[in-house]
Amino acid sequence: MLGTGTSSANLQEPLHWTETFRTPTWMDYLRLNHRLTAADKELDQRLLELHVGEVPPRTKLSIERPTGAIRKRDQSTSFFFRR
């Protein structure tokens, strides 16, 4: 399953762009990012070559939790909560 994405500019820092990409599940995200084709890798390299800054672009991962998505402690694995 494909995800959806957006790009947005920071109004205080016009050269700072944020790309947001959403997938329905964590497994979809992993599949999408760890099964890259040769064409995907080539496109990534071409996009990186467009970067003009001295420091390479950074990647930050975030997990968005919808409002009302309540998870009880006993329904979670130790991966999410330290016991």
Image: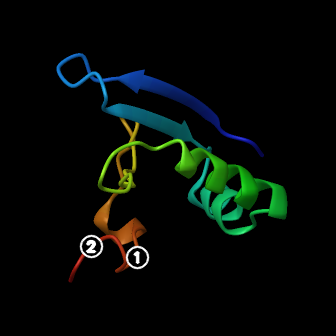
Tags 2 and 1 touching, CB below 8 Å: yes
Q: Is residue 67 visible?
A: no
Lateral position of residue 40 relative to residue 22, left or right: right
Q: Secondary structure at mark 1?
A: loop
Near-viewer residue (39 or 49): 49
Residue holding disc 2: 81
Q: Secondary structure at mark 2?
A: loop
Residue holding disc 1: 77
Above or below — where is 36 with respect to 4? below
Count residues near mark 1 (Cα–Cα under 10 Å), then give few for <14, some for 14-19, many for 20+: few
Above or below — where is 49 with respect to 38? above
Q: How many marks?
A: 2
Residue drawn at 53 percent across, 27 percent down = 6
Q: What amino acid does circle 2 point to?
A: Phe
Above or below — where is 4 with respect to 36? above
How are the colours assigned in the image?
Answer: rainbow
Above or below — where is 67 with respect to 41? above
Count residues near mark 2 (Cα–Cα under 10 Å), then give few for <14, some for 14-19, many for 20+: few
Residue 28, horizontal then vertical, whole percent:
67, 56
How far separated are the C-alphas under marks 2 and 1? 7 Å
Residue drawn at 39 percent across, 55 percent down = 59
Lateral position of residue 55 relative to residue 24, left or right: left
